[in-house]
Image (spheres, grey):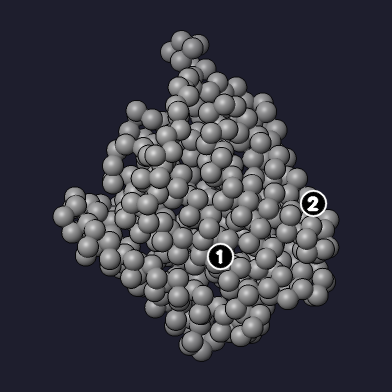
Amino acid sequence: MNSKSINKSSTLIISTIGAFLSFFIFGFVDNIKGPTISPLLQELGFNYSNIGTIFFGAYFGFFIAVIFSGLIGDIIGRKFLTILGGVLLFIGVISYSYSAVLLFLSLSMIIVGLGLGVIEVAANAFIVDLYSGSNKSGKYLLLLGFFHSLGAMLGPLMAGKLIQSGASWKSVYRISAIMIAVLIVYFLLINYKKPDTKKAKIDFDIIKTILFSKDMILFSVVILSYVGIEIGVASWIVEYLQKYKGWSISVSSIALSLFFFGIMFGRFFSSFIVEKIGYIKIMIYSISSAAVCLALGIFGPKEISFFIPLAGLFISIIFPTTTAAVSEISKDNIAIRLGMLFAFAGIGGMLGPWLLGVVSDRLGLNLGFPIILLSFSVIMLITLIIIQKFIYSSKPAELVD
């Protein structure tokens, strides 16, 4: 093997590790919010609507970032796009940990969301660039999701342990900033030359046509509902289990980690069966099972509250399968379709925790938690049934059955 091949192989490995690291930190930082709600409420005297507003800011930033970072990435390259995401994330996390006013907390969380959104696009683009044409991009994109779930599982565990030991919620964010700094330095040091890209003209007529197509409208509702459920649970399960099920901060934080462990395991396992069952059908089974788990955990006795995090196992398949289904609609304008899909995912991330906070402030978290989560579940189920019965009844077998 000559030196050129060795250098190419090394760059591939180092860049892949960097993409995985960025998504691990994404999942970690995005999901330390839940365990920090109670101490933040106690220290600052906020209500649930205030917390919902703060969380809304994170996914508002994410929404803005996923729309524009694709265009930026073609100009500055994947490496510096990731560095930009890391810098934004670092600034947001540090400023959040030093804020004590609702306005500055919300603005800081918007910056956090911007960083997360840029990393979302950059990491996926990295993997596609590195493995396109090798028939391995799907495998490595699934692994990318695995590392996100791993970070999402370990983040709440660390946060819960620190807070249980008497650490401030601010310390949790400051420690995570160290990891983000490592990510920035890592990408500053790697040697990655962006692939040559043609600067395509943005065709707003095509964007308009895709945006208002029945396919994209329905799948956008599915992805919005899914993210509303995932982020709603991730943001509020710790507070809910403590206040209404009598769980400790440590155990309820473990429940959040188990929720993401279920998502991580479910995505790995489902990769072996999704093509056999069909995209739409397996999503119908998944959301139905997840809704049953949520209902049992919420309305049942304390002893079966573990059904709430178990819902993560069933909803895990929905995001990647929706992405795959949208990719099957047409082989043209895939980037535009997926960009729009991720934008609606950002809207779901904004609406889920915000609506849950607002409703809980008026009716109590014991009612707000089930109303919002089960409403999103029902909306998704109805939408998937419409897709199966009226949109894809004559489509390829992998989509419906």
Residue 94, position as x, y percentages in the image: 78, 50
Task: Check disc 2 and report its element: helix, strand or loop.
Answer: helix
Q: Nearer the viewer, residue 190 or 124?
A: 124
**Residue at x 67%, y 40% (from the top left corner):** 86
Q: Nearer the viewer, residue 67 or 148?
A: 67
Point out which mark residue 351 bears: 1
Residue 266, position as x, y percentages in the image: 40, 59
Image quarter of residue 354:
bottom right
User: Is residue 266 something one can see in this rendering?
Assistant: no
Q: Earlier in the sequence, mark 1 or mark 2?
A: 2
Q: Residue furthest top?
A: 2
- Alpha carbon separation for disc pair 1 and 2: 23 Å
Q: Quadrant of the N terminus?
A: top left
**Residue at x 82%, y 58% (from the top left corner):** 99
Question: Badge 2 is on which residue?
Answer: 95
**Residue at x 59%, y 45% (from the top left corner):** 65
Q: Residue furthest bottom?
A: 301
Image quarter of residue 362:
bottom right
Left or right: where 107 falls relative to 156: right
User: Is residue 376 something one can see in this rendering?
Assistant: yes
